[in-house]
């Protein structure tokens, strides 16, 4: 799984995070280092689609929160990925 949008959504399931915290978390759990352009491009698209939203912060860093639509979207994507994994595992057994 290397889709930046899915990685951001997965990171935000753990709670509100600003961009740098998302980058660090994604590298920790997925082993993928996202550059700022990739990260903030994904954040912009997710926000435009209503899947995440900014939350107020007294800090200059902007935290984001997963919306209910974002959670539902992530659940659908994870289920689709699980089907792909199951299919690939089954086919590998017979290869």
Image: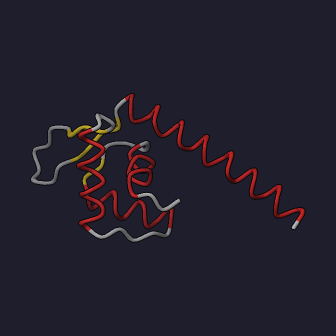
- Vertical arrangement, residue 26 with respect to residue 73, above or below: below
Picture coordinates of residue 2 (x, y %)?
48, 62
Left or right: where does residue 59 sit relative to residue 21?
left
Residue at image coords 69%, 53%: 85
Residue at image coords 74%, 58%: 88
- Return the residue found at the far top: 68
Picture coordinates of residue 14 (x, y %)?
43, 44
Residue 34 falls in image quadrant: bottom left
Picture coordinates of residue 41 (x, y %)?
25, 57
Total numbered badges shown on the rendered structure: 0
Q: Nearer the viewer, residue 60 or 8?
A: 8
- Return the residue found at the far right: 94
Residue at image coords 29%, 60%: 39
Q: Nearer the viewer, residue 4 or 94?
A: 94
- Vertical arrangement, residue 34 with respect to residue 77, above or below: below
Which quadrant, please, contains the C terminus?
Answer: bottom right
Residue at image coords 67%, 51%: 84
């Amino acid at each position: 799984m290397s889709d930046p949008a899915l990685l951001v959504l997965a990171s935000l399931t753990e709670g509100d995070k600003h961009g740098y915290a998302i980058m660090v978390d994604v590298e920790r759990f997925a082993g993928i280092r996202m550059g700022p352009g990739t990260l903030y491009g994904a954040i912009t698209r997710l926000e435009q689609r209503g899947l995440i939203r900014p939350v107020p912060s007294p800090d200059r860093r902007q935290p984001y929160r997963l919306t209910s639509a974002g959670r539902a979207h992530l659940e659908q994507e994870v289920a689709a990925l699980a089907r792909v994994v199951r299919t690939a595992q089954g086919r590998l057994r017979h290869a």
